[in-house]
Amino acid sequence: MNNITPRSSTFDTPTATVHARFESHTSSNFLKLVENATYKVKRKPADLDVKLTELLKFLIEHEARLKFPLENNLEAAKFFCYRGLLTCVACTPFENKEPWKIVAILYKGNIYLCARETEEKRQRKLRMSEKDKQFTSWGYKFEQYMLSERPDIEPNPNVPVDETEEFSLVLTTHLNHHKIVYGAEMDGIICDKSPVAPLPDTEGNPDNIVQYLSSNMFIELKTNRHIESSRQEINFKSSKKINTCKTCSLAEWRYKTRKWWCQSFLVGIDTLLCGYRNDDGIVEELKVYNVKDLAKMSEMYWKPNVCFNFLDTFLTYVKRCLAKKIKHKFGQKALNNLQALPLTSLLFVWTPGSSVQVSDNYSHEDDPILLEWFIENFGKHLTDIL
């Protein structure tokens, strides 16, 4: 991959969707994550395939406010995706286990990136035990202990956990010359450092919501297996080759810090709160991390600039491959008339130890990502004006 040093990312106009939740402190010494882990939990369906549906709904609903221009060349094309995909690609240079599959769809001058399930992930989901599912539920329960619906009330962990609820932002940024629009699930706003005003009327001017969210600091919440001793904590911080806990190797810790850092950096979060639990689902320690320190803690094993160099180069590669397909199929002139082209797609596949492979092995008819209601309506507002 090219050794490109990306400029610092900037994030403009985050926009809220639904179910706002806010960070607050808790006075509990121990947090019991197992309380609602079985009969009370409303879990996400195991076969849920979110594709880009919620992001597409947002784009349709806010098209007039967003005022994205119609682009006719690939250099100016915007990428639309979710933060999880960007994190996955950025972490690739240091990944040695998880393969990925990404569909790139060019339509009306925009490029839509959507992760698809790999066979490895499908098999892993089929093998998930009830204990594995419980571990996932513990993360949601931890959020319930730490977060409340409004900044002026305490969290209420005594109600059933609903894992289908989420609060998301849509953000825009530039990575070098690439324009990216992406959705990201957010955990909460920090409320214990200074007073936070109540949420504005959600039925009023959406710009008031944007201003409110932009003026507050978000926090990322995580849970992890408890580190057993202070010596292991020191070893984790200094990145020496000693296991940090009974069940997590240092390699797994490095994987987590890399992912945590990427997730937080992409949405401008500076603070991460981790709840360290035991095997019985009891959080015994809360630890706050400065996100920039995560990279320092593992600097011998992964580097942020390498992650974002790879992401930048991958996005360039996607455009280059689409240009090659367009030129071959529709001719050179079509590269400057993207609005006239039909939906064009490519599949990108990566497995550890190999390079990214690109093919036409994706059929939008068999696996529609841009749904019919989106194809028929998005961009129509600007077309009508023109």
Image (cartoon, rainbow, N blue to C red):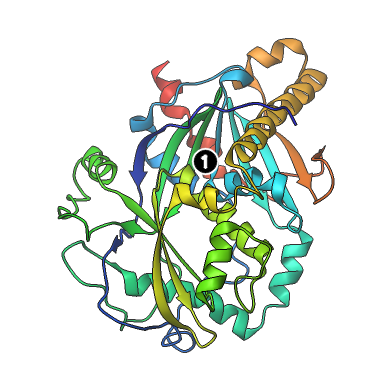
**Residue 291 placement (x, y as % from top left):** 45, 50
- Residue in the image at 70% along x and 46% along y: 92
Please indicate whether residue 205 sits to the left or right of residue 166 in the image. left
In the rendered image, the vertical position of residue 210 relative to residue 235, given as above or below: above
- Give x and y (percent) for residue 210: 28, 41
Occupied quadrant, residue 316? top right
| Quadrant in the rendering for residue 126 | bottom right
Work out whether residue 156 or residue 379 is closer to the camera in this orientation and state it.
156
Is residue 299 shown above or below 285? above
Query: Which x, y percent locates residue 152?
Result: 16, 64
Left/right of residue 3 with respect to residue 52 in the rendered view: right
Please name the residue that numbered disc 1 is placed on: 374
Residue at the image point whose x is 58% and y is 65% from the top: 235
Q: Residue 345: x, y in percent?
A: 72, 36
Question: Of residues 241 and 11, which is closer to you in this image?
Answer: 241
Name which residue type carries label 1: Phe
In the foreground, 86 or 95: 95
Looking at the image, can residue 10 be seen? yes
- Residue drawn 30% across the image and 58% down it: 20
Neighbour class for label 1 at 10 Å: few (<14), some, many (≥20)? some
131 or 96: which is nearer to us? 96
Q: Is residue 26 above or below residue 326?
A: below
- What SS does tag 1 mark? helix
Residue 94 in the figure: left or right of residue 27: right
- On the rendered image, what quadrant is the N terminus found in? top right
Considering only vertical position in the picture, is 67 above or below 327? below
* Residue visible at 70% across and 15% down in the picture: 334
- Of the 4 image quadrants, the one containing the C terminus is top left
Residue furthest top in the image: 333
